[in-house]
Image (tube, rainbow, N blue to C red):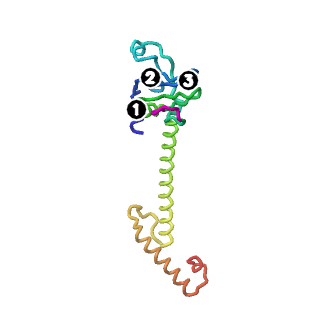
Amino acid sequence: SHLSSQHRMSGTKRSGYLEKKGEINKNWRRRWFEQRDTRVKYYKDEQVWQAGGRPNGMIPLEQSVVRPCADDVGKDYCFEVITNERIYRLVAQNHEDMIDWIDHLLPFTLMHAENEWIEKTDAQIRLTSLTVAKDIESEILRHYRHSRGQEEDQDEDDDNVEEVKEDMGVNVSAVDEKDRSGSSDQLGDLGR
């Protein structure tokens, strides 16, 4: 995720040869690809790209999903870019190159944006849960002190939680003793 953020902020450019399966003609063709931000353009070859020539096509990343090929396409190091219009199947020269392309493309995809949103939401939920738990703990301690006749405005930093637990343990033991002695009062029933 840290690496992904660096790519997105700098608009990292990635270029190199990949094989691409044709949409109509299903042959594999070697093409020069250039990724910059949310677009991947592909050219007949590196010379056309260097000369500022017109690309053969463009793959939009914003609403896409990038992943290793789900189907066996008969080639190693295959990955796919799934857009609303079509599935682009691409083949890298080796495993490392495939992973590098996926890492460069992923930060600009729909899946990455959704995952970032999910991560931020999860972090907010955890933070909210922690805050709620601390509020509940403070409320329990406040009620406990009040029932023990202690001052309510005592500084929370001075809370001696172990002392409270010991006191509560003594109370629980007292309930257990009453219960064993055969007492059928409400307090004894709670101890069972």
Q: Which residue is drawn at the image coordinates 39% and 28% (left, top)?
A: 10
Q: Which residue is drawn at the image coordinates 40% and 24% (left, top)?
A: 16
Measured in 3D between alpha carbons, the distance from the residue under mark 1 to the one under mark 3, in whole angstroms, is 22 Å
Please give the label number shown on residue 30.
none
Within the image, what quadrant is residue 50 found in?
top left
The percent coordinates of residue 95 (x first, y second) are 41, 35
Within 10 Å of disc 2 (Cα), the crowding (few <14, some 14-19, many 20+) is: many
**Sequence-first disc among 3 and 2:** 3
**Sequence-first disc among 1 and 3:** 3
The overriding secondary structure of the stretch rendered in magenta is: loop
Q: Which residue is mark 2?
A: 33
Q: Which residue is mark 3?
A: 26
Amino acid type of disc 1?
Answer: Asn
Q: Is residue 134 above or below residue 19?
A: below
Query: Element at badge 2?
Result: strand
Q: Which residue is drawn at the image coordinates 42% and 16% (left, top)?
A: 49
The percent coordinates of residue 76 (x first, y second) are 46, 33
